Amino acid sequence: MKVNHNFANIAQSYLFSTIAQKVADYTAAHPDAPVIRMGIGDVTLPLPQASIDAMHAAVDELSHQESFRGYGPEQGYDFLKDAIQAYYASHGTQLESDEIFVSDGAKSDVGNILDLFDQDNTVLVPDPVYPVYVDTNTMAGRKILYMDANESNGFLPLPDPAVKADIIYLCSPNNPTGAVYDRAGLKAWVDYALANQAVILFDAAYECFVADENLPRSIFEIEGAKKCAIEFCSFSKTAGFTGTRCGYTVVPLELEFEGMNLNKMWLRRQTTKFNGVAYIVQRGAAAVFTEEGVKQVQEHLDYYRENARILADAMDELGIWYTGGKNSPYIWLKCPNGMESWEFFDYLLENANVVGTPGAGFGENGKNFFRLTAFGDRDKTKEAVERIKKLLS
Ligand SMILES: *Cc1c(COP(=O)(O)O)cnc(C)c1O
């Protein structure tokens, strides 16, 4: 037996374990310190009531022989795909039902999609980056190139015609930087991909945070994208499904490379290796698009958006450079006084009892940056902001 030795090349991520250890050490030494955690990228508000009601009803359906359901379609039930299709149409993007694949979340699909691509492809990711894009390709032994996301391009790198890549990862609104591409930026990437016969893997996990009507929520708002892009989306950040698990991937019917149709390949891949998302969960996800569901989700998003605004206002007041905060639940700030991100982490923990995420954990270009999230409690966010302002002004 020969193992996949590529696993030995995956960088160990010490980011969240180091944060947890540092916080544990600090609270052990200062048991009464009122530590506020603004670091983890998980939601805190409960599921929308519409989803809860729909899931309860689905459990009841499964409890009677007449309405029991076993295996469902691997690609998802029509009631959910129709709702996703209508959601895209409401933002001006027409999708065929066969282009939508329901999954157990964006993270799995972002990894699983690599089954469609040869090992001999060059991958292009931004630095800083959501680590899943790098680790999944390292496991497969692919060559990875990095593009510079930095202060001068607002953490929104554009294609460099001199760099030849085959598989390009874009995440907008971005985790960790909160930066959002405008149409011109995404068009530059679509044009590059079409010219280079490359594929764009577009992570739209945070599209629901886009409030500015001029910013794209989907790469398919850009002409030509259906010939070069796959889009991943999720109910995790939209509707609090991080633990419930449901997402979807859009693979256009027109997506063809070397005489192979990627939509048909993905269908084959999913029907072979995946047996669908739980009926109960799909009912809960579909309820997100009902009239009450939309209203409840908006209330949750508004709550997080207001937290983001409170954080962004504090940065404005302090004169700290940042991206995100608008159209995104993340604030990506430049550490003050030239501090490095772990140094700033310690400084903030010890002097303000506030925990954030050091940018160094997302790549070299994050070395002097720091991520705060808007997914927390309102009063704690306000309290954290007061402490940060007091410390840094
Ligand atoms: C949270 C997140 C996801 C969503 O993952 P799920 O598996 O659907 O929970 C995808 N991409 C990024 C960048 C994320 O931050």
Image (cartoon, helix red, strand yellow):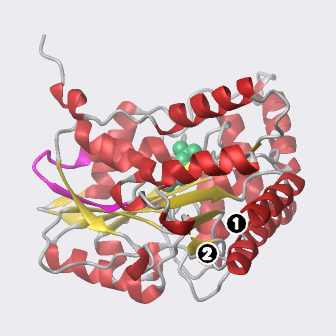
Query: Image quadrant of residue 197?
Result: bottom left
Residue at the image point whose x is 79% and y is 38% from the top: 55
Residue 111: give x, y in percent of width and height: 37, 43
The mark lying in front, picked from 1 and 2, is: 1
Residue that carries the numbered disc 2 in the rendered image = 320
Mark before the other along the chain sequence, 1 or 2: 2
| Nearer-the-camera pick, 101 or 307 | 307
Q: Label 1 is placed on what type of residue?
A: Leu
Can the viewer see residue 248 in this picture?
Answer: no
Mark 1 near ligand 1 (CB under 8 Å)?
A: no
- Viewer can see residue 281: yes
User: What residue range appears in magenta?
Assistant: 116-127
- Tag of residue 208: none
Asked whether the residues under the numbered discs 1 and 2 touch, taking CB atoms below 8 Å apart as contact, a structural biologist would say yes
Q: Which residue is rendered at x = 43% and y = 33% of the image?
A: 274
Give the camera-side residue of 46 and 113.
Answer: 46
Give the x, y percent position of residue 136.
31, 41
What x and y, as percent, mark residue 50?
85, 51
Does residue 307 sit above or below 72 in this rendering?
below
